[in-house]
Amino acid sequence: MQEVKNVPGDLLEKGAIVQRDRKTYAIAPHIPGGIIDAAGLRRIADVAEKYGAGVLKLTSAQRIAIVGIAPEDIDAAWEDLGMKPGAAIGLCIRSVKICPGTTFCKRGKQDSVSVGLKLDEIYHGMPMPSKFKIGVSGCANSCAESLVKDIGLIGSTKGWKVTIGGASGAKARVGEVLAEDLSNEQAFDLVKRVVDLYKASGTKKRLGSYIDEVGFESFKRDVTAP
Ligand code: SF4
């Protein structure tokens, strides 16, 4: 295969991802929980129009990517947006996917929006050994795909179930149940323990693969130790 030279790559420091044409970029502002007001939505549309972006793409991480920005317009586009980039790539906590929960959904059993937004505030963009995703669902229907997230929260009438080690993609894995019937505060504490233990492990594997290596019961023992 012929070597391709001088092909531009992603501009991580600008939150810009090079597109298939290898000339233009996509930028995706951070929209916690995918919740945005009309003015914010309009601003994104205005920026797309102003800089000639071909399309807006709704992403699986509940963001809106502005696709087709020229490299020389990236800084100005961010300035006009007045928003922070979403952590779309890199070894960090990428996104906290949040379902509508008791705020909006008639089936909701727990307040996934406020719990998810708090987790987003604490963890979004935090450096990790591997890519890392969190999903918060207000009931067992798990619309935020909690079972295929590195950490998943699933609401019931009794509180939160916390699962760990889920992943979708090339090496799919269903998360395992770490604890059930937790209050909001207990769930926050457990998420912190999982994140801290994983960060201190020295592994470079994704959480589910690391759990496969050390054993779920061993990881659970360590994470729940007083
Ligand atoms: S997971 Fe449950 S609460 Fe959340 S959107 Fe789906 S049905 Fe509604």
Image (cartoon, rainbow, N blue to C red):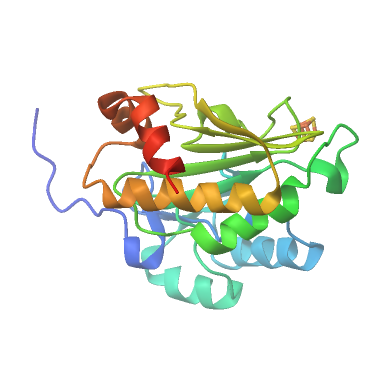
Q: How many marks?
A: 0
Q: Position of residue 132 (x, y in %)?
A: 42, 44
Placement of 40 over or under 164, stated as above or below: below
Ligand 1 quarter of the rendering:
top right
The residue closer to the viewer here, 50 or 188, is 188
Q: Residue at x 22, y 42 (%)?
A: 203
Instruction: Determine the residue positioned at 62% across, 49% down.
Output: 186
Q: Is residue 137 left or right of residue 195?
A: right
Query: Is 108 in front, or is 125?
Result: 108
Is residue 177 something that shows in the picture? yes
Residue sitting at the far left? 2
Residue sitting at x 27%, y 29%: 214
Farthest-out residue, right:
106
Instruction: Give x and y (percent) for residue 151.
Output: 51, 39
Answer left or right for 28 relative to 170: right
The quarter of the picture where the N terminus appears is: top left
Mark yes or no: residue 73 visible. Answer: no
Q: Residue at x 78, y 35 (%)?
A: 158
> Is residue 222 toward the left or the right of residue 184 in the image?
left
**Residue 75 image offset from top left, x and y in percent:** 44, 74
The spot of residue 130 in percent (x, y) is 31, 44
Residue placed furthest toward the front = 226
Q: Quarter of the image holding residue 207? A: top left
Q: Vertical placement of 18 versus 73: above or below? A: above
Task: Tell me where residue 102 sits by quadrant.
Answer: top right
Q: Please name whichever residue, 5 or 193, is drawn nearer the observer in this view of the structure.
A: 193
